[in-house]
Image (cartoon, helix red, strand yellow):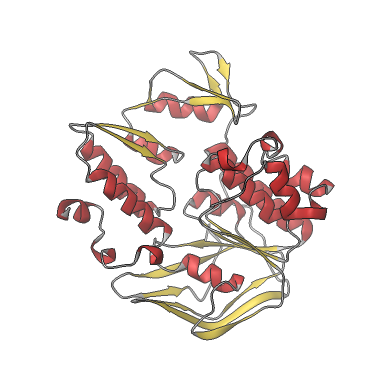
């Protein structure tokens, strides 16, 4: 146990209550529990979700070390981590909710390139209509719109941890990306803006309607996706804009007849993003929307979020650990700093565009 705690850098959270752990801390805990098992084969399903880049690299190194004398099978959507960590790769393609096909093993370099291109040469199969192409630079906008929501020196104490947020604001039509290490209070800050959690000091000035997508998606619903959307959105479920600009790009129509309890993590994430964006709100708070999504769907989700904000003159605050995803959608950044040892987190007083 001491060795695993050291390898996973878990010393600072051993005395922390489980329900007070952040998403990244819970992910590291789950991985640590798996590492403590004496096994011949280790199965890691989406181990990078909710982890910041530092922790993703740490876990990848641990897995590489484990694979010296054991077998490790990893399901992963982070292509950079997969490329760096894996000895060989299977690509899974098919139609979500209908069927899936697993290819033979390929070299990592070949598999990643074929996945990005959308064409598997040896199988002579096109798995995607278009290739995944990365933009060279961010399309930045100057935001001089009125202030939609603001906060004044907010602080919140959770056990031994204290979050401190300097004064700031979000303007109309602005998309603010949020970056920072795990366990620095990003989710707590989003909950304060959403009105779910009250600050100990300071205040949030807002009378706007808020739509909130939580970090963890747990849907206890007995029914189909169509039933859930009908109940959640009511009169907006048949809205043309909602169907054309949100549901169709996120491929929700393919899920309509499926039972909600049978959806995969990525399908639940897409559904949660779609329902959140379709709500009649002024401020959209999205906590780690890229988790469990593959690379193609992450880019599509980024485009949908950006388009909804621009076309409807709405604002959003998006927490995520995928830097490219944040780069695609954000006008400016909010950076969380601090550490578990100090028990504090500070938000940068000044926001700068991602490329500056």
Is 286 displayed left or right of 110 in the figure?
right
Q: Depth check: 82 or 234 in front?
A: 234
Residue at the farthest bottom position? 201
Q: Quadrant of residue 249?
A: top right
**In this picture, residue 53 sits left or right of residue 202:** left
Residue at image position (40%, 55%) is 52
The residue that appears at 63% across and 46% down in the rendered structure is: 271
Q: How many marks?
A: 0
Q: Position of residue 101 (x, y in %)?
A: 51, 21
Q: Compared with residue 238, is residue 123 higher up or lower down, i.e. above or below?
A: above
Residue 324 appears in the picture as rendered = yes
Q: Which residue: 27% across, 40% down? A: 63
Residue furthest to the left in view is 2
Nearer to us in this view, 168 or 284: 284
Q: Position of residue 103 (x, y in %)?
A: 45, 19
Residue 351 in view (yes/no): no
Q: Indicate left or right for 188 with 231 as reference.
A: left
Q: Residue furthest front?
A: 222
Left or right, 166 with respect to 280, comes to left
Where residue 93 sits: x, y (%)? 53, 25
Q: Quadrant of residue 119?
A: top right
Measured as percent of width and height from the top left, residue 295 is found at 53, 39
Residue 63 higher or lower than 324, as above or below: above
């Amino acid at each position: 146990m001491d060795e695993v705690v050291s390898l996973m850098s878990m010393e600072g959270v051993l005395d922390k209550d489980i329900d007070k752990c952040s998403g990244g801390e819970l992910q590291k805990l789950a991985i640590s529990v798996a590492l403590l098992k004496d096994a011949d084969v280790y199965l890691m399903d989406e181990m990078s979700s909710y982890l910041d880049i530092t922790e993703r690299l740490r876990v990848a190194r641990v897995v590489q070390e484990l694979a010296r004398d054991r077998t490790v099978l990893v399901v992963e959507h982070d292509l950079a981590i997969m490329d760096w960590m894996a000895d060989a790769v299977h690509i899974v393609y098919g139609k979500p909710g209908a069927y899936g096909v697993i290819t033979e093993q390929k070299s990592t370099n070949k598999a990643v390139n074929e996945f990005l291109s959308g064409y598997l040469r040896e199988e002579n199969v096109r798995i995607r209509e278009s290739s995944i192409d990365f933009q060279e630079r961010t399309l930045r906008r100057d935001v001089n719109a009125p202030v939609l929501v603001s906060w004044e020196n907010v602080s919140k104490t959770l056990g031994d941890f204290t979050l401190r947020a300097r004064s700031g604001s979000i303007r109309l039509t602005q998309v603010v990306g949020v970056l920072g290490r795990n366990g620095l209070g990003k989710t707590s800050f989003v909950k304060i803006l959403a009105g779910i959690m009250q600050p100990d000091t300071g205040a949030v000035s807002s009378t706007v309607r808020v739509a909130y997508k939580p970090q963890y998606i747990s849907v206890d619903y007995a029914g189909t996706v169509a039933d859930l959307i009908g109940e959640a959105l009511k009169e907006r479920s048949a809205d043309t804009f909602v169907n054309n600009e949100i549901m169709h790009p996120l491929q929700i129509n393919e899920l309509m007849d499926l039972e909600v309890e049978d959806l995969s993590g990525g399908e639940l994430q897409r559904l949660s993003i779609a329902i959140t964006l379709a709500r009649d709100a002024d401020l959209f708070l999205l906590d780690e929307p890229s988790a469990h999504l593959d690379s193609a769907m992450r880019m599509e989700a980024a485009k949908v979020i950006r388009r909804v904000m621009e076309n409807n003159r709405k604002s959003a605050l998006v927490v995520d650990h995928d830097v490219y995803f944040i780069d695609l959608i954000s006008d400016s950044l909010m950076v969380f700093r601090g550490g578990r040892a100090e028990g504090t987190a500070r938000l940068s007083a000044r926001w700068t565009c991602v490329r500056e």
